Image (cartoon, rainbow, N blue to C red):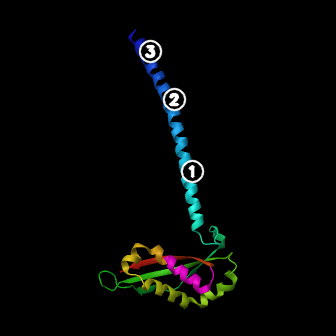
């Protein structure tokens, strides 16, 4: 008799639990839908702001496939003295750099041969950028250095066929 009573009690608790779970699910689903709509609205507003912030005539960045990439390694490892920082000491940067070229860019055929012959000018731009930053700035934000080097090289050629600068190795002392 006791076993039957316990079975009935467990069955009743199971039914109550199922009903409460169903009620909880229906009440949460409404809130989840409202939250999803709010997040969609925020993300669409942010997308509009990003689109407005782009320069006129600049579309979204195109995807470059691995077949369309050519990597040119600057052969020498460069030792560059950095600008004096807060400690007043002279610090150095030891860096190896590679350039990524977009083979599909219209200027690729025109400027590709010039990259090898102008390697000293490219190195000069790299030296100029890295020398202008103190060690604290360079160590904490190497992406800023890469972007600044890329901008200077693209400006030098007047083209964006070089689309990325990569530090194969970078050390500070």
Q: Position of residue 143 (x, y in %)?
A: 47, 73
For image coordinates 42% across by 17% down, the residue present is: 9
For image coordinates 54% across by 91% down, the residue present is: 120
Determine if the magenta segment contains residue 90.
no
- Height in image: 32 above or below 6? below
Most common SS among magenta residues: helix
Q: Mark 2 to mark 3: distance in Å?
A: 21 Å
For image coordinates 56% across by 46% down, the residue present is: 37
Determine if the magenta segment contains residue 156.
yes
Q: Nearer the viewer, mark 3 or mark 1?
A: 1
- Height in image: 111 above or below 15? below
Q: Earlier in the sequence, mark 1 or mark 2?
A: 2
- Which mark is drawn over residue 92? none
Residue pointed to by mark 1: 40
- Of the 4 image quadrants, the one containing the N terminus is top left
- Which mark is drawn over residue 22? 2
Answer few, some or many: residues within 10 Å of disc 2's Cα (few below 14, many 20 plus, some between 14 and 19): few
- Of the 4 image quadrants, the one containing the C terminus is bottom left
Q: Earlier in the sequence, mark 3 or mark 1?
A: 3
Q: Mark 1 to mark 2: distance in Å?
A: 27 Å
Secondary element at tag 2? helix
Q: Position of residue 107 (x, y in %)?
A: 68, 81
Q: Which residues are magenta?
A: 146-159
- Which mark is drawn over residue 8? 3
Nearer to the camera, 124 or 61 = 61
Nearer to the camera, 29 or 5 = 29
Secondary element at tag 1? helix
Question: Where is residue 49, by image quadrant?
Answer: bottom right
């Amino acid at each position: 008799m006791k076993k039957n009573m316990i079975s009935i009690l467990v069955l009743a608790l199971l039914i109550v639990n199922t009903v409460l779970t169903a009620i909880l699910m229906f009440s949460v689903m409404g809130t989840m839908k409202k939250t999803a709509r709010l997040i969609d609205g925020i993300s669409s507003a942010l997308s509009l702001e990003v689109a407005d912030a782009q320069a006129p005539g600049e579309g979204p960045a195109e995807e470059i496939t691995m077949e369309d990439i050519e990597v040119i390694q600057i052969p020498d490892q460069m030792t560059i003295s950095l600008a004096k920082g807060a400690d007043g000491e002279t610090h150095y940067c030891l860096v190896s750099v590679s350039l990524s070229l977009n083979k599909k860019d219209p200027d690729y055929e025109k400027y590709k041969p010039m990259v090898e012959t102008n390697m000293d000018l490219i190195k000069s731009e790299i030296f100029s950028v890295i020398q202008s930053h103190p060690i604290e700035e360079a160590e904490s934000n190497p992406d800023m250095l890469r972007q600044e080097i890329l901008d200077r090289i693209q400006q030098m050629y007047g083209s964006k066929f070089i689309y990325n600068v990569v530090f194969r190795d970078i050390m500070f002392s």
